[in-house]
Amino acid sequence: MFGLSQHQRFFLFSQTVDMRKSFDGLSGVVKQQMDRDVCSGDVYIFLGKRLDRMKLLVWEPSGFILYYKRLEAGTFRLPKAQNHSISLTYCELSLLLEGLEVEVKYQRKRYSKILKKV
């Protein structure tokens, strides 16, 4: 079973990429420019130059999955960032996919269980 959940971490690449890139090309961007482990299970998000296409790359134990969305009208908004990677929550990703701007001014307090690393 594949799908995205709020238990994953989401990282948006802060620059546009060539949408002809597939698994290997996007994996290279994750490793070299985002400086992250592509096989971690995190979700990596990429926007095309016209900002009307988005790809999400995620590793599952059996291999990579690539999600692709093309807007019929309008564009996504690429947030400004200081480095190559912008961390998003599942909620922020949902907003981005729906065309809403992802810029959180204030988020109300919510419960989150802190997991201990063993």
Image (cartoon, rainbow, N blue to C red):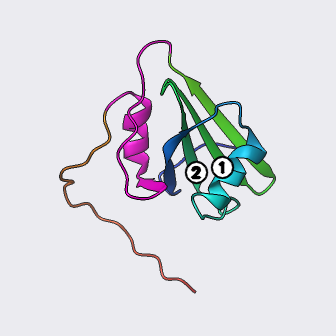
Relative to the observer, which residue lies in front, 18 or 75?
18
When the figure is inspected, residue 41 is found, relative to residue 92, above or below; the finding is below
Q: Which residue is mark 2?
A: 43
Instruction: Classify residue 29 as left or right of residue 22.
Output: left
Amino acid type at image mark 2:
Val
For residue 49, side relative to residue 112 (left or right): right
Give the mark, 1 or 2, whose residue is nearer the N terminus: 2
* Nearest to the observer: residue 75 or residue 113: 75
Instruction: Classify the position of the C terminus by image quarter.
Output: bottom right
- Kindly identify the residue that appears in the image at 65 percent across and 51 percent down: 29
In magenta stretch: residue 7: no
Which of 115 and 37 lies nearest the eye of the viewer? Answer: 37
* Image position, residue 76 (x, y; %): 42, 29
When the figure is inspected, residue 47 is found, relative to residue 42, above or below; the finding is above
Measuring from the top left, give residue 56's x and y in whole percent: 60, 41
Q: Is residue 80 magenta?
A: yes
Q: Which mark is residue 58?
A: 1
